[in-house]
Amino acid sequence: MPIIQTTYNMKASEAIQQILTDVASAKANGNQQIIIANLEAYLASALTKAQAEESSAGAEQITEAEHNLEVWKAQLTASTNHSIEMFKSVIEAGQTALRSAIVINGGAAAALLAFAGNAITKGQSLSGDPLLSKVGLGLGWFVAGIGFAGFATGLRYLGQFAYSAWHANRQRSYARVIGDVINCMTIALGIASFTTFFIGGYSTYSAIAKPSETPITYVTPQRGG
């Protein structure tokens, strides 16, 4: 009796059809009866071959699955590293922006304080003079800019704390909402800090470059007799 030709993807109906074909072939060759021993040998041989093909196909599938797993792991690692680096760059950019806001506003405020102190010390102006009043307005803007930037720096840490709480327990969805709100507030305060710098700079420029409608008082130091 011929050996059944099986494949790994052969369905049960196809296997039965193959057996019927082999039986018909044996009948056509003049065999009227099938000996049990020959039938058992036939089925055992077919089973052995099918198992071997299944094992080979299974090994190929395992190898392919392992390859796909390694590819997925590599892609996940690359995506995770990219996300981490992007997160670090965003944090660093925010820190740099807030530091810059503090430095430029602080430097401008220090320069105006030195200017006003020098004018008063040398007796060129008195407290309450129009020029010093306008310069003081610019100084107020610069100080406000420092305050905005400092407050934004503090809020940034609170926002990171909220995000950390959300990552620790994803069920705390409110923590992410709080983090998003704080993040928006931090951005708004940073923009406000730079805005006050430009407003303060324009105010100071107007006080020094534009003529004053009120005459400026100059104080002449008196010499002792």
Image (spheres, rainbow, N blue to C red):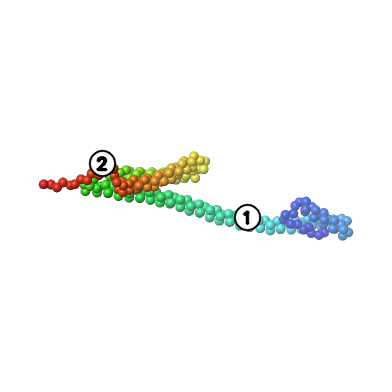
Identify the element where label 1 is drawn.
helix
Q: Mark 1: few, some, or many residues within 10 Å (few <14, many ≥20)?
A: few
Q: What is the number of the mark on residue 15?
A: none
**Numbered label tally:** 2
Label 2 or label 1, whichever lies nearer to me, is 2
Q: What is the number of the mark on residue 128?
A: 2
Label 2 vs 1, first from the N-terminus: 1
On screen, residue 210 above or below 22: above
Mark 2–mark 1 contact, CB under 8 Å?
A: no
Residue that numbered label 1 is attached to: 65
Q: Residue at x 68, y 58 (%)?
A: 56
The answer to whether one can see residue 100 in this image is yes
Q: Mark 2: few, some, or many residues within 10 Å (few <14, many ≥20)?
A: few
The answer to whether one can see residue 142 in this image is no
Q: Residue at x 80, y 55 (%)?
A: 18
| Amino acid type assigned to the residue bearing label 1 in the image | Ala
Q: Nearer the viewer, residue 218 or 115?
A: 218
**Which quarter of the rendering shows the N terminus?**
bottom right
Residue 81 location in percent, x, y? 50, 54
Q: Which quadrant of the figure has residue 39?
A: bottom right
Indicate left or right for 32 with 91 as reference. Answer: right
Identify the element where label 2 is drawn.
loop
